[in-house]
Image (spheres, rainbow, N blue to C red):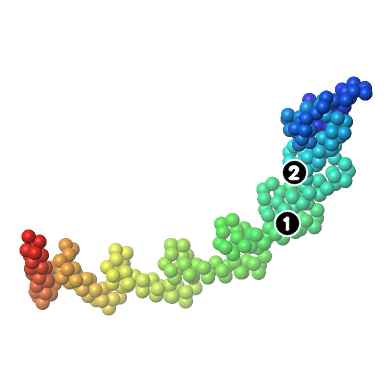
Amino acid sequence: MKQKPWGLLAWAVLALPAGAQPAAPSRENVDACLKGLPSCNLSLLTAAELAQASAAAKRRNYDKCLDGSPACDPVPLTKEELATVQQRLKQRNLDRCLNGAATCDPLLLSTQEAAQVRTQRLRRNLDRCLAGSPQCDPLLLNQDELRRVQTLVRRKNFEHCQEGMNTCDPTLLTPEELQVVRTGLKRRNLNRCLNGFSTCDPLLLEESEVIAVRAAAKRRNYEKCLAGSATCDPLQLTAPESAAAAAAYRDRNRTRLRQNVRTR
């Protein structure tokens, strides 16, 4: 069975012959004993040094108990020390409960502390609900809180729908909000179509918008043909545009020829 440090100290004192003094101890051994190090040799300590080492061991144990260390031994604690340790234990448990830690022990809470912990839990839940967290428990909300959360959720959903986000839930929109969202969707789609983006949905275009999109596509194609792009579609060009594109092609060829002559 593992002996306590103060048990070892008592044994060392009793082991000394009557009237005998321990061998001259080194300062290193005394320091090791005061610090509770394994290199401590208790048999080399004087009675006064043994008392100091015992007091130091008790202080270390008390500190461990205050810190909630599993190495704490409550047996040698005085009544006052034990009361302080228990109070510190309850305070640490209260802090864990207030923070919603899984290690909270509700059985250690007083009635007042339990009410304080519940209030904090409800506040954390409300914060999660207002933030749209999946950890929100709507059953813990009162009527006023539930209305606040629903209002915020609807407002955020409306913003998401206006921005075209995939988190938009159109079923939460009012008729007025739905009209605003549809208008914004059509505007964004028109801009995509005018710029020739692949995400353009031609089915959402009005007749006048279709005409504008076609004109923009023809203009982009004409600019590609003027620049000699491989994606130019000459079949979409008018006669004057074809002539201009051909002239631009000849100019580029003449420029290249002159540059080749200069480099020879």
Crowd class of label 1 (few under 14; some 14 to 19; many from 20; radius 10 Å) = many
* Residue drawn at the location 67% of the way across and 62% of the way down: 123
Q: Is residue 35 left or right of residue 177?
A: right
Crowd class of label 2 (few under 14; some 14 to 19; many from 20; radius 10 Å) = some
Q: Is residue 177 left or right of residue 195?
A: right
Q: Which residue is mark 1?
A: 117
What is the x, y in percent for residue 175?
47, 74
* Residue drawn at the location 77% of the way across and 51% of the way down: 91
Compute the Cα span from label 1 to label 2. Answer: 21 Å
Whichever of callouts 1 and 2 sits on the residue coming sooner in the sequence is 2
Q: Which residue is mark 2?
A: 68
What is the x, y in percent for residue 107?
77, 48
Q: Pick whichever, 18 or 137, lies toward us.
A: 18
Most distant residue in the bottom direction:
208
Q: Amino acid at mark 2?
A: Gly
Vertical placement of residue 52 versus 200, above or below: above
Vertical placement of residue 107 versus 19, above or below: below
Res 181 quadrant in image: bottom left
Res 120 quadrant in image: bottom right
Res 37 quadrant in image: top right
